[in-house]
Image: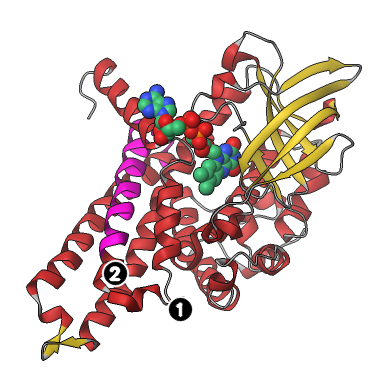
């Protein structure tokens, strides 16, 4: 197995330390450079694999760490403080390992789990298409039976890691007109004939996310590479999306926490009109408001993580945590950047990258509008929800 799990005894303490060391050694020196568009996957995934970060929630029998969801979220927070985009790239590949170990323990996990956890290969998850984002039931990528396998046709876009992934979990419609019920998931290798990458020129602040797309033209996928059969995949998608909402919310909190700590330090040392900035009520109230909103978001995130670990229904809690945390980050990262004056634009700080990331976070795994719809649905149909 790729990881020496002895290095990480049960419990999260030592992996937190490993995450911190990894972030200082492999994210901090690169983040600003990557944020200008010079991302190199080798500098991210292999060191992350060596640090144990690609097996956080993968069970110990597969060589992972078997952490709780709350601990996984804490590790991701440590990474997101420095580079949200890199943390998203890592967790997306990690999630595919955990999915293969759970859904395909006989076929796909033995083939790919070890290399994915080592970071020598990278994976991603592809739902979104050029014509279907929020409305997932409308995906047009098709999977048609062909002998002992399936023939896939279609296109995907806005996929984290798609710019360089070796394997992609592709969600495709197996039965036209059947909506979400006909959707199945396939593990498609990027070197399959008919797989063609489509580059996305995004804002450079997102470059370590490796965003991209691809076209599938008669890509043959063997039955052994079916991850979820039609009818099974939508339940898995929704559960995975709820979990992602919770950790994306946690990562938004981490970005604001980092920004607050930079602002507080700056407010003590920078003087204007004969006193330090933090002695001006107008200045420090902005900081106090951000700290208060952060505390509220952290409590919501903690509740969502706790519900996931206890196996409770998390739809509302995860939607509300992400709604609140992303909008809190969008609002307060802007205010905190302003509180730094021009200094905040220096690339030794992450304010601008974090702000772009917070806006991106408000779209991933359910846009703000979709989350509001989810909460409104609960309020209408579940008396007592709120
Ligand atoms: C940084 C980033 C990473 C991503 N990573 C992945 C990935 O790894 N895999 C993947 O499959 N996808 C990924 N996505 C895609 C993401 O899931 C979609 O962007 C998201 O689902 C929204 O879809 P859309 O962009 O097509 O917007 P649309 O669905 O076209 O929506 C456009 C706007 O209209 C609003 N809207 C839509 N429907 C309604 C409604 N009913 N009522 C009110 N407003 C509405 C939306 O909130 C949004 O503001 C990523 C996106 C981003 C930005």
- Magenta-colored stretch includes residue 243: no
Closer to the chain start, of discs 2 and 1, is 2
Q: Judge left or right: residue 264 versus residue 200.
A: left
Mark 1 residue's CB less than 8 Å from ligand 1 = no
Residue situated in front as seen by the camera: 103 or 379: 379
Neighbourhood count class around disc 1 (C-alpha, 10 Å): few under 14, some 14–19, many 20 upward: few
Quick check: 2 left or right of 72? Answer: right
Q: Ligand 1 near label 2 (Cβ, under 8 Å)?
A: no
Q: Can you say whether 153 is above or below 160 in the image? A: above
The residue that mark 2 highlights is 260
Residue 3: x, y in percent? 71, 63
- Residue 194, horizontal then vertical, whole percent: 86, 34
* Picture coordinates of residue 334, whole percent (x, y): 30, 60
Quadrant of the image containing the N terminus = bottom right
Please indicate, yes or no, whether residue 87 appears anywhere in the rendered image: yes
Residue 209's place in the image compared with 225, above or below, is below
**In this picture, which residue range is highlighted in magenta?**
309-335
| Residue for badge 1 | 348
């Amino acid at each position: 197995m790729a990881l020496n799990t002895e290095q990480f005894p049960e419990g999260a303490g030592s992996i937190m330390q490993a995450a911190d060391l990894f972030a200082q050694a492999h994210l901090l020196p690169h983040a600003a450079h990557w944020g200008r568009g010079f991302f190199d996957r080798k500098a991210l995934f292999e060191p992350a694999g060596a640090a144990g970060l690609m097996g956080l929630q993968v069970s110990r029998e597969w060589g992972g760490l078997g952490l709780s969801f709350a601990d996984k979220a804490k590790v991701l927070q440590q990474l997101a403080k420095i580079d949200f985009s890199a943390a998203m790239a890592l967790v997306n590949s990690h999630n595919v390992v955990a999915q293969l170990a759970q859904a395909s323990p006989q076929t796909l996990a033995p083939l790919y789990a070890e290399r994915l956890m080592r970071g020598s290969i990278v994976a991603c998850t592809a739902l979104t298409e050029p014509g279907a984002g929020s409305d997932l039931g409308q995906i047009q990528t098709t999977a048609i039976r062909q002998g002992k396998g399936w023939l896939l046709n279609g296109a995907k876009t806005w996929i984290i890691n798609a710019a360089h992934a070796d394997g992609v979990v592709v969600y495709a419609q197996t039965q036209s007109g059947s909506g979400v019920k006909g959707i199945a998931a396939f593990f498609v290798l990027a070197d399959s004939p008919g797989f063609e990458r489509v580059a996305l020129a995004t804002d450079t602040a997102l470059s370590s996310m490796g965003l991209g797309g691809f076209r599938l033209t008669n890509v043959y996928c063997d039955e052994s590479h079916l991850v979820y059969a039609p009818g099974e995949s939508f339940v898995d998608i929704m559960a995975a999306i709820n979990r992602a909402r919770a950790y994306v919310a946690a990562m938004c909190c981490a970005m604001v926490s980092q920004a607050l700590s930079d602002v507080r330090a700056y407010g003590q040392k920078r003087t204007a009109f004969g006193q330090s900035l933090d002695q001006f009520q107008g200045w420090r109230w902005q900081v106090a408001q951000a700290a208060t909103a952060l505390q509220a978001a952290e409590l919501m995130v903690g509740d969502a993580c706790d519900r996931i670990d206890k196996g409770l229904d998390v739809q509302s809690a995860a939607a509300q945590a992400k709604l609140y945390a992303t909008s809190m980050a969008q609002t307060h990262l802007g205010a905190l950047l302003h509180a730094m004056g021009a200094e905040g634009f220096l690339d030794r700080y992450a304010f601008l990258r974090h702000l772009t990331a917070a806006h991106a976070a408000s779209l991933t795994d359910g846009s703000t509008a979709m989350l509001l719809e989810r909460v409104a649905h609960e309020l209408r149909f579940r008396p007592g929800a709120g």
